[in-house]
Image: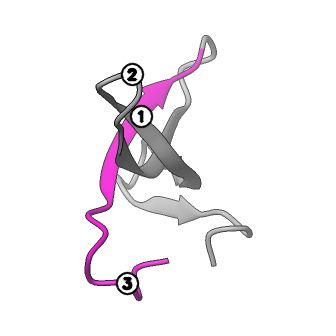
């Protein structure tokens, strides 16, 4: 995922209704027609363990 040096990956988190926190990674790309930035690629990283504070990495991220 991070093998390309020209792409800046951003990380974000969101919490679902059950209180589980998920971490995602994404990068944006400029859309010259609409003159605004769009998410070009999004990857599910894993779930945050609330007890230890560690991220349990997802199978697709590895």
Q: Nearest the camera: 40 or 15?
A: 40
Magenta-highlighted residues: 1-16
Q: Is residue 41 left or right of residue 30?
A: right
Q: Residues within 10 Å of mark 3 (few under 14, many from 20)?
A: few
Prevailing secondary structure class for the magenta stretch in the rendered image:
loop
Marks 3/1: CA–CA distance: 19 Å
Relative to residue 4, is residue 39 drawn left or right?
Answer: right
Q: Residue 20 is drawn in which quadrant?
A: top right
Furthest-right residue in view?
Answer: 59
Residue 20 in magenta? Answer: no
Question: Which residue is under mark 3?
Answer: 4
Residue lying at 29% horizontally and 25% vertically, measured from the top left: 35
Residue annotated with mark 1:
38
Compared to 27, does 22 lie above or below? above
* Residue under the point 40% across and 80% down: 2
Q: Secondary structure at mark 2?
A: loop
Do the numbered discs 2 and 1 sit on residues whose CB atoms are within 8 Å?
yes
Quadrant of residue 57 in the image? Answer: bottom right
Please say if the residues under marks 3 and 2 sit with CB atoms less than 8 Å apart. no
- In front: mark 2 or mark 1? 2
Q: Is residue 13 magenta?
A: yes
- Give the crowd class for mark 2: few <14, some 14-19, many >=20 residues within 10 Å: few
Where residue 7 is drawn, which disc sits there? Answer: none
Relative to 41, is 21 above or below? above
Residue under the image location 39 percent in, 60 percent down: 54
32, above or below 9, in the image? above
Per the image, label 3 sits on a secondary structure element best described as: loop
Q: Which residue is mark 2?
A: 34
Does the image show residue 23? no
């Amino acid at each position: 995922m991070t093998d390309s040096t020209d792409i800046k990956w951003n990380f974000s988190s969101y919490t679902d209704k059950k209180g589980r926190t998920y971490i995602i990674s994404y990068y944006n790309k400029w859309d010259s027609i609409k003159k605004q930035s769009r998410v070009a690629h999004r990857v599910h990283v894993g779930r945050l363990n609330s007890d230890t504070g560690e991220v349990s990495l997802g199978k697709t991220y590895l």
